Image: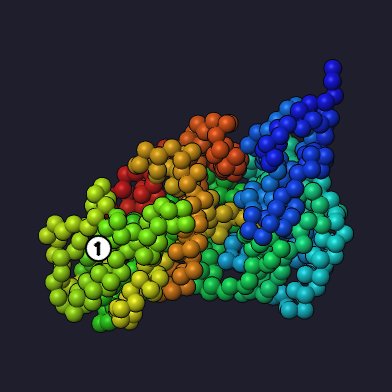
Amino acid sequence: MTNIFEVYCANDGKMHQAALGTPLGDIAKDCGIELRDPKTGEPTPILAALVDHKLKELRYRMVVSHEVLFIGYDHPDGRRCYIRSLCFVLQKAVRDLFPDKVLTVHHSLPSGLYCELLEAEPGEDGHRAPWFVTDENLERLKDRMDEIVAADMPFNREKVLSDDLEALFRAQNQPYKADLIDSLGKYITSVYSLGDVKDTFYGPLVPSTGILKTFDITGFGEGFCLQLPVIGKPGKVMPMKRQGKIASALKSHTDWCNIVGINGLGNLNHLIMAGDAVRLINLAEARHERKYAEIANMIYEKRSQVKIVFIAGPSSSGKTSSSLRLAIQCKVVGLNPKVIELDNYFHNREDTPKDENGEYDFESLYAMDLEYLNKQLNQLLEGEEVEIPKFDFKQGKRVFVGNKMKLEEKDILIMEGIHALNPEMTSAVDNSKIFRVYVSALTSLGLDENNTISTSDNRLLRRIVRDNRVRGITPEQTIMRWHSVRRGEARNIFPFQENADAVFNSALMFELPMLKYYAEPLLRRIAPNSPAFTEAVRLLKFLDMIVALQPGEIAAIPPTSIMREFIGGQTL
């Protein structure tokens, strides 16, 4: 029996020999694998590896032949490993300096992650109050993190009894982490250690702290932002962007989570297992209806001036349903909404701009006939009657079918599209006549105290379910297109979020348990040799931590819900 086996390395396209039990990190060194930043060409550290398309930490020991792809910060899974590891460094620094405080990582910000330090003991309302972190203490926290990074401390993983780990976290004032472990019902749980601190993370970490040199901390709100490296420039920290409206919407969702007593995925799982899902559905839907009514009231109060409502948001945020439900609420307060699709103002196909690859760029602002759009909007604002075009996507050209429109005194025009918050789209229209609404699934619910749930993952699951049901697109195709979708959002939507007059958070507390019921069987169809398999495995591991709704509970979701846009049965 030989102790040598072969490994195919996808980075250099070569077969390499290794001894049985060799860690992945050593294989990378022995094979001379070097990663370079695709933009600068500078060497970047190897953070993890994909072994037969499954994410593994560099300590993973090889015993049989596999295909291996070593990844760095330019790969989404590499970034996740870096961020998880950096959060553990932050956790240790907090424990070292402020042992009577509890770190919570709430949600993403444009520059990183929003974090707070909470008092260990709950107040009279049952909730732990944020502890205001002074600039001096933030500086101490950053210095301690730098010391931990400079010490190049190893991250070690072991398996322990779940009951023991649950008891540990309750003793450390981390009840959400303990509740999640309890709700999963597993006998054994993996735990990482960094020095004397133990914590759970739901994915691999990097080998040691010395890799985590790029980060910063800046005060924000009642807490601070843990700033992350720039994608494509892993040696540079993301500049601080203070988007107050989005942060306010996320804080509002966090406050509501506290009100209903669901502060982590473990709480949610226990509620569903207790048979209380229908009550939660009713509460969440009532909150949505109230917010639509608030936005309609804002529009009504400006009715003497505002005549156009623009709605924008990233993919699968529920923009179409939100447009229809907002229109209903506008009717309730006495306005008469009229809806126009911005897609009708596309240039004819031959006039559409092309991207760097010579392909038509339909997501570009200039794919729209801005001059014609502005002309018709100004005509409508002047009280003129216009014929609204219809874009024939099959022929790739604008056609007219006699759809004429005129805005009367109580009429309000509602238009939805990806560029609706970009002021350049309506540069020739009086801005005071326009009310802008940003819609996105801004969930602030976390797995536990310091493991967040990605809003992007939430939207991806929505899209997988809808694409398969409505458009005949396989989960594999949706996953493979998602990177391009996200790139377009970063270019065309996210820079203009703060232009919104109102932010509608389309996240619903019950949607992940609902999406699990639909998405899990779809993801399991993706074959191991598919390029989408890595992402499918990651999403399935995430869904494994969620208790699914049952068909009888899903039936309680009202036909006007945003969720019906994705699972069917909508009556709007």
Which residue occupies the foreground of this view, 212 or 410? 212
Q: Quadrant of residue 107?
A: bottom right
Q: Quadrant of residue 401?
A: bottom left
Split into 4 quadrants, where in the image is the N terminus? top right
What residue sits 50% from the left and 62% below the top? 490
* Left or right of 109 on screen, residue 442: left
**Place of residue 466 in the rendered image (x, y in percent of width and height, measured from the top left):** 40, 44
**Place of residue 307 in the rendered image (x, y in percent of width and height, measured from the top left):** 26, 75
Compared to residue 79, the image places residue 1 above or below, namely: above
Instruction: Say whether residue 145 is visible.
Output: yes
Compared to residue 521, the image places residue 85 above or below, namely: below
Which residue occupies the foreground of this view, 357 or 51? 357
Residue type highlighted by circle 1: Val
Instruction: Say whether residue 504 is visible.
Output: no
**Place of residue 284 in the rendered image (x, y in percent of width and height, measured from the top left):** 44, 56
* Left or right of 324 on screen, residue 190: right
Please, what secondary structure does the residue beneath circle 1 have?
A: strand
Q: Quadrant of residue 319?
A: bottom left
What residue sits 22% from the left and 65% below the top? 338
* Total marks placed: 1
Q: Write down the residue under mark 1.
A: 339
Which residue occupies the foreground of this view, 247 or 227? 227
Compared to residue 485, the image places residue 255 above or below, namely: below
Instruction: Check disc 1: other Cα within 10 Å, few if <14, some if 14-19, many if 20+.
Output: some
**Place of residue 386 in the rendered image (x, y in percent of width and height, measured from the top left):** 15, 69
What residue sits 20% from the left and 61% below the top? 389
What residue sits 59% from the left and 62% below the top? 108
